[in-house]
Image (cartoon, rainbow, N blue to C red):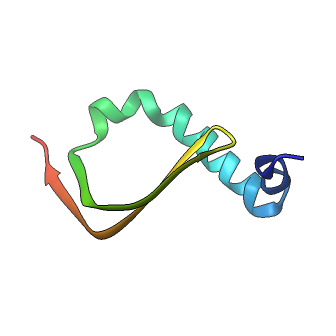
Amino acid sequence: MATFELYGRSTIGMCLTETLDEMVRLAPSYSTQVKSKVTIKGHLHTHRFCDNVWTFILQCSRVKTVKRM
């Protein structure tokens, strides 16, 4: 059984799936309602691609938020 299947059937996996589904439903409204842009910069420590999911581990990262008009 793949790792995704193990976590996907757990309580936290089901909650994550529910949340992501809701975000996909809201995506069309993001272009008109979201008023900020986020930029993430940092040193890439590790990256991996497992079960069709990319994971990036950053060190000394900075998150910058800029309001759009």
Q: Quadrant for residue 45, please give it.
A: bottom left
Horizontal placement of 43 versus 53: left or right? left
Q: Which x, y percent locates residue 35?
A: 21, 44
Q: Quadrant for residue 6, please give it.
A: bottom right
- Please tell me which residue is depicted at 30% across the width and 30% down the height of the picture: 31
Horizontal placement of 39 versus 23: left or right? left
Q: Which x, y percent locates residue 12?
A: 74, 62
Please identify the residue farthest to the bottom as the structure is shown: 60
Count of picture labels:
0
Please identify the residue farthest to the top as the structure is shown: 28
Q: Which x, y percent locates residue 49?
A: 58, 44
Return the residue nearer the eye: 67 or 56: 56
Return the residue nearer the eye: 43 or 12: 43
Please identify the residue farthest to the right as the structure is shown: 1
Return the residue nearer the eye: 20 or 57: 57
- Please tell me which residue is depicted at 69% across the width and 47% down the height of the picture: 18
Q: Which x, y percent locates residue 46?
A: 45, 60
- Quadrant containing the C terminus is top left
Q: Quadrant for residue 64, please give it.
A: bottom left
- Please tell me which residue is depicted at 45% across the width and 32% down the height of the picture: 27
Horizontal placement of 25 versus 14: left or right? left
- Please tell me which residue is depicted at 14% across the width and 50% down the height of the picture: 67
Q: Is residue 49 above or below residue 30?
A: below
